[in-house]
Structures are given as C-alpha cells and as structure tokens.
Amino acid sequence: MEAVQYRREILSLLKSFTDKDFMKAHEDADGNLFTIHQYVNDFIWHDQHHIGQMKNFISN
C-alpha cells in the first residue's frame, strides 16, 4: 500500500532530525513560522480526525 510506504518514509525522515532541527523555526509560503514539532502534532490531529470519520462511516 502506498500510504503505508509514505508513512514509513516520513517516519524515517523524522528520525533523522536532531532535537535542534525538530524545534528550528521555518517559514512557510505565507511568511508564517512553524517548527517540525508543531507540524507533526497538527499532522497527527488531522489523521485522527479522518480516522474518526472513517470509523463513523463504517459503523453506520
């Protein structure tokens, strides 16, 4: 499954970052600052949101 492979690649990349890299501020295309740490937390929340939607759909 491609989704599983992409997740493994993301995890591998995240594991390669130092703590300093993980907390370093980056600028997005709109000029807003973010850290990898913040991005990962948002990514997890977003995934959990969609998992909940799928579970709800399957149970109905």
Image (tube, grey):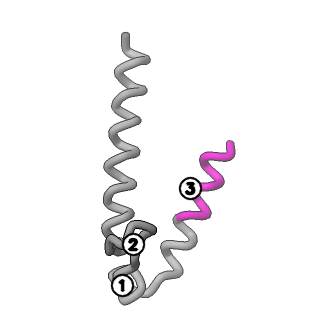
Residue 2 versus residue 25: which sits nearer the camera?
25
Q: Is residue 47 above or below residue 44?
A: above
Q: Residue at x 39, y 79 (%)?
A: 26
Q: Is residue 59 above or below residue 24?
A: above
- The location of residue 32, given as percent across then percent down, is 33, 70
Looking at the rendered structure, the secondary structure element under dot 2 is helix
Which secondary structure class fits the magenta region best? helix
Q: Are marks 1 and 3 in contact (CB under 8 Å)?
A: no
Q: Residue at x 50, y 76 (%)?
A: 15
Q: Which residue in the structure is indicated by mark 2?
A: 36
Q: Which residue in the structure is indicated by mark 1?
A: 24
Tell me how far mark 1 sits from mark 2, CA to CA.
7 Å
Q: Amino acid at mark 3?
A: Arg
Q: Give the mark nearest the N terminus, 1 or 2.
A: 1
- The location of residue 10, given as percent across then percent down, is 55, 64
Image quadrant in which you'd find residue 18 = bottom left
* Magenta residue check for 2: yes
The residue range painted magenta reads 1-10
Looking at the rendered structure, the secondary structure element under dot 3 is helix
**Furthest residue to the right?**
1
Q: Which residue in the structure is indicated by mark 3?
A: 7
Q: Is residue 47 above or below residue 57?
A: below
Which of label 3 and label 2 is nearer to you?
2
Q: Give the mark nearest the N terminus, 1 or 3.
A: 3
